[in-house]
Amino acid sequence: MKHTLIVFILIFVLHSSFAQWKSNETAPSIVSASRDFQYAVLYSIDEEGNSFYMWADYRDNLIDLYAQKLDMKGIPQWTKDGLRTGRIFDKSTFIYTPKLIKPDSKGGAYILWHSCIDTNKTDRRNLYAQYVSSEVKAQWTDNGIKVSEQELTSDDANDGVLELNDLKNDKLLTTFNVFNRLTNNNVVFTKKLNYAGKVVEDEIKLLEAKGLETKVLV
């Protein structure tokens, strides 16, 4: 029931700030109350009861990616009003991009998202990743690392295949799709990185199908 309450609260206070209930209290805990607009919030929970949030943020009149961690009592653990982890778009406009946040079981989290590369064609994307350690530091450069040199295509957050799994032993498995509008071919790839964000296995084709609706569950 607690998890359900979190989801409802996020939906209804999305435009000004968003929050999670503290235990034994009726007042919500503020995840971010920064100026301007915040939307497209996603969250994940680890085994210790910490919750990790990420969202598109307009406080600098662009679209940046911000994240926050709340402990099991709803107390923010990262930078006030969220930690900037990367850039989604060099322009202020309304778009929805695939993204995810995955706890690392050590108090930090891995983040994966689509970054737009053309202010005139928002469906042109690159895939980026970031790691925030338990010390609240973005580890993989200010704007994250580019996971693939291939250009992705996506019209909204539901178009993309996007997943990251920790295989342990210093290996992260990323899964993503590359869609070609001219041929209507949708190809799903995997690629392995280590915990430092370096490539340990190049891209491998997982499957290929016609149409942008191709989905994969990893």
Image (tube, rainbow, N blue to C red):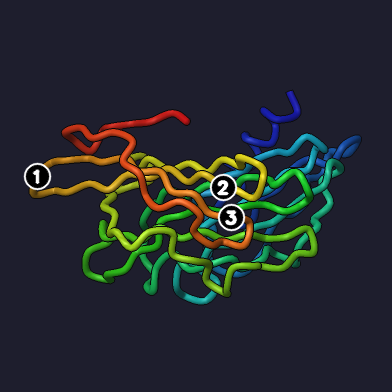
Residue, x 56% and y 40% (percent of image)?
165
Residue 130: % across, % down: 57, 61
Residue 134 horizontal side relative to residue 125, left or right: right
Residue 13 horizontal side relative to residue 78, left or right: left
Q: Secondary structure at mark 1?
A: loop
Marks 3/1 in contact by CB < 8 Å: the verdict is: no
Residue 41 horizontal side relative to residue 215, left or right: right
What residue did someone put label 1 on? 183
What residue did someone put label 3 on? 194
Separation of marks 2 and 3 at Cα, in angstroms: 6 Å
Q: Earlier in the sequence, mark 3 or mark 1?
A: 1
Residue 68: % across, % down: 69, 56
Q: Tell which tag, 3 or 1, sits nearer the viewer.
A: 3
Q: Tell which tag, 1 or 2, sits nearer the viewer.
A: 2
Quarter of the picture containing the N terminus is top right
Amino acid on which the number 1 mark rests in the picture: Thr
Amino acid on which the number 2 mark rests in the picture: Leu
What residue did someone put label 2 on? 172
Residue 20: % across, % down: 74, 43
130 versus 97 height, above or below: below
Name the one closer to the observer, 18 or 153.
Answer: 153
Name the one closer to the observer, 8 or 129.
Answer: 129
Residue 176: % across, % down: 38, 45
Separation of marks 3 and 1 at Cα, in angstroms: 33 Å
Marks 2/3 in contact by CB < 8 Å: the verdict is: yes
Residue, x 32% and y 44% (percent of image)?
177
Residue, x 39% and y 68% (percent of image)?
89
Residue, x 26% and y 41% (percent of image)?
187
Q: Earlier in the sequence, mark 1 or mark 2?
A: 2
Q: Earlier in the sequence, mark 2 or mark 3?
A: 2
105 versus 133 height, above or below: above
Separation of marks 1 and 2 at Cα, in angstroms: 31 Å
